[in-house]
Amino acid sequence: MTLIETFGRNVRQARKDKGWTQEQLAFEAGVKRAYLSEVENGQRNVSLDVVEKLAKALGAEPGALMDQA
Amino acid sequence: MTLIETFGRNVRQARKDKGWTQEQLAFEAGVKRAYLSEVENGQRNVSLDVVEKLAKALGAEPGALMDQA
């Protein structure tokens, strides 16, 4: 699994852990819902500014969203 | 400090811990030295594919390169 895929999987899990829809997380992070969907599916080569926005919205450490566990 | 700046600082520290020049790390990671210099200076909004290349070259976990400590 690439880091892009791992990150997407972890974002989806963290979002579900909060009981949020993609719409809710997209709004909180200031990204579009369609974009977030692609991120979660490992189809977007996300840059660090977006990693930071998503981590803040989720209340997670950016590094924790990279964990391969 | 933004995540972009934190990441750059951590990459530089991890590189120095290995006793590598920017030329060496750039070669191992398959990026240009001038680009790596900008990354280390927090001037590049790095994407996850490059995070993964740099982490592998450094023998580091991608998430560890995000640590704000």
Image (spheres, coloured by chain):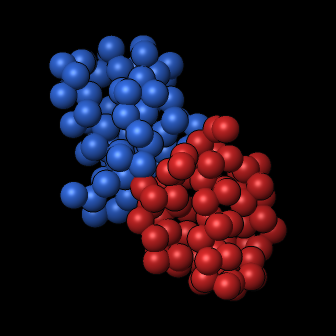
Chain colours: A red, B blue
Q: Say if A39 sits above or below A12 in the image.
A: above
Left or right of B13: which side holds A21?
right
Q: Residue B24: where, in percent of width, then height?
A: 33, 14
Residue drawn 36% across and 27% down? B58
**Residue at (78, 65) in percent of width and height:** A37
B32 or B59, which is in the foreground? B59
State the residue at coordinates (50%, 29%): B53
Q: Is residue A35 above or below residue B12?
A: below
- Give the quadrant of residue B3: bottom left
Q: Position of residue B26 (x, y in %)?
A: 40, 20
Image point (27%, 59%), residue name: B68
Query: Relative to A62, does residue A16 appear above or below in the rendering?
Result: below
Q: Is residue A19 left or right of residue A52?
A: right
Which corner quadrant holds the C terminus of chain B?
bottom left
Q: Quadrant of residue A1?
A: top right
x, y (%) of residue B27?
A: 42, 14
Q: Position of residue A53 (x, y in %)?
A: 51, 70
